Amino acid sequence: MAGKTSAKNTAQENLFRELRTFAEQCGIEVRCEKLSRDYGYRVRSGGCTVMGNKWVIVDRALPARERLDLLADELRESLGEQVEIPAKL
């Protein structure tokens, strides 16, 4: 069973990388960072604008599926109908 989970994670990691490349081709900076956590505040992954440029910050500690879902959602929100996402993604 571990082999199936590993293969699934690898496929999701590959898809995340492809989606990240696509986002960057569309002018969206994607950063995978270790987001700090401390008493009194909570940092979350998500989109933001930095000096007029769209960024998506992704917590690299998230499971592959959550990172993939987050990036896909941010792309849908940012790009809307402006651009067609390639079918393989």
Image: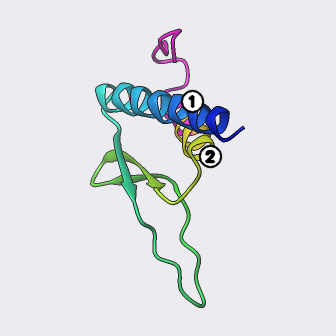
Instruction: Name the side, left or right, on which 40 lies relative to 13.
Output: right
Q: Position of residue 26 (x, y in %)?
A: 34, 26
Quadrant of the image occupied by residue 50: bottom left
Q: Position of residue 36 (x, y in %)?
A: 46, 76
Q: Main secondary structure of the magenta part?
A: loop
Outermost right residue: 1
Task: Look at mark 2 in the image and give the residue it sits on.
Answer: 66
Q: Position of residue 61 (x, y in %)?
A: 51, 60
Outermost bottom residue: 39
Residue placed most toward the observer, 5 or 84:
5
Task: Look at mark 1 in the image and give the residue it sits on.
Answer: 76
Residue 87 is labelled as none
Q: Position of residue 29 (x, y in %)?
A: 32, 43
- Element type where label 1 sits in the image: helix
Residue placed most toward the observer, 87 or 77:
87
Question: Residue at image x 59%, y 50%?
Answer: 63
Instruction: Name the side, left or right, on which 18 lies relative to 85.
Output: left
Hey, what amino acid is under mark 2?
Answer: Glu
Hey, what amino acid is under mark 1?
Answer: Arg
Question: Residue at image x 37%, y 25%?
Answer: 22
Q: Quadrant of the N terminus?
A: top right
Q: Reply above or below: 71 against 87.
A: below
Color style of the picture: rainbow
Residue 58, magenta (yes or no)? no
Pointer 2 and pointer 1: residues touching (CB < 8 Å)? no
Which segment did they paint magenta?
74-89
Q: Residues within 10 Å of mark 1 (few under 14, many from 20)?
A: few
